[in-house]
Image: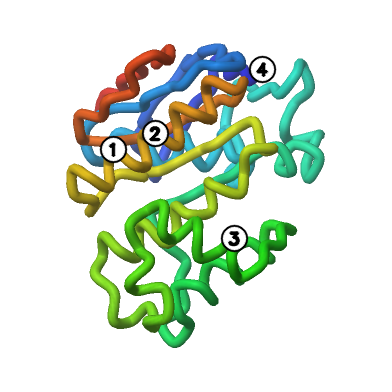
Amino acid sequence: MLQARQIECTRGNRRLFHDLSFRLEAKQALRVGGENGSGKTSLLRMLAGLSPVEAGEILWKEGRIAALGEDYRRNLVFLGHSNGLKDDLTAVENLRFALALAGLEAGDTALRAALGAQGLASIADLPARLLSQGQKRRVALCRLGFSADKPLWVLDEPFAALDAASVARVAAVVVAHLRTGGMAIFTTHQEVDLTGVQVCPLELGVQ
């Protein structure tokens, strides 16, 4: 269970949001919306423990995430705007490297199967510099297929640069995670079909 209690975010001398509270439990997703500059990415970075809260508190299972530190971060996957791919590594090598950074291991067969599930089998051995933006995003999102044991997924614009078929594939992965007891927080400007699971909207407004 994740809770935000009266949290606040300011950038420069502009307050993006304040007195923001919500509660997220197993099998629930939080869809964060709002105009550009409304604080969506800042909020996700706070929830992932990457940026400090300026007021209020964020709790994981009743403990403050700032105090839990690495014990909290072991429970989550964070995917930001950047795909984090190295141009000279192939798709397979990039996925292997990303999993290693997260403390996960997978054999070549499993890595290629994950890429194939996202329609990337034909580009598995191409260096990332030759991939389209949508293909790069899908390579990065393949991490989710190895993260079922991480209950909380925090995803910043996971569907950006994806075509309709790819959006559907990624949405299916998120739905499967929620149905097995996981949680997800994500931002998106697109309409995404997450039928069969509970998605709570949170709209941030520019102040």
Label 2: which residue? 172
Residue 193: % across, % down? 27, 25
At label 3, counting other C-alpha atoms closer than 10 Å, the crowd grade (few under 14, some 14-19, many 20 or more) is some
Label 4: which residue? 1
Asked if residue 29 lies left or right of residue 148, the reply is left
Q: Quadrant of residue 128?
A: bottom left
Whole-angstrom CA distance, mark 3 to mark 1, is 21 Å
- The answer to whether the residues at label 3 and label 2 have Cβ atoms under 8 Å apart is no
Closer to us: 179 or 78:
179
**Looking at the image, residue 157 lies above or below residue 186:** below
Label 1: which residue? 168
Please, what secondary structure does the residue beneath circle 1 have?
helix
Compare marks 4 and 2 and give the one earlier in the sequence: 4
Label 3: which residue? 110
Label 1 vs label 4, nearer the camera: 1
Q: Residue at x 37, y 81 (%)?
A: 126
Compare marks 3 and 2 and give the one earlier in the sequence: 3
Label 3 vs label 1, nearer the camera: 3
Whole-angstrom CA distance, mark 1 to mark 4, is 27 Å
At label 2, counting other C-alpha atoms closer than 10 Å, the crowd grade (few under 14, some 14-19, many 20 or more) is some
Q: Residue at x 46, y 21 (%)?
A: 29
**Looking at the image, residue 132 lies above or below residue 198:** below
Please, what secondary structure does the residue beneath circle 4 have?
loop
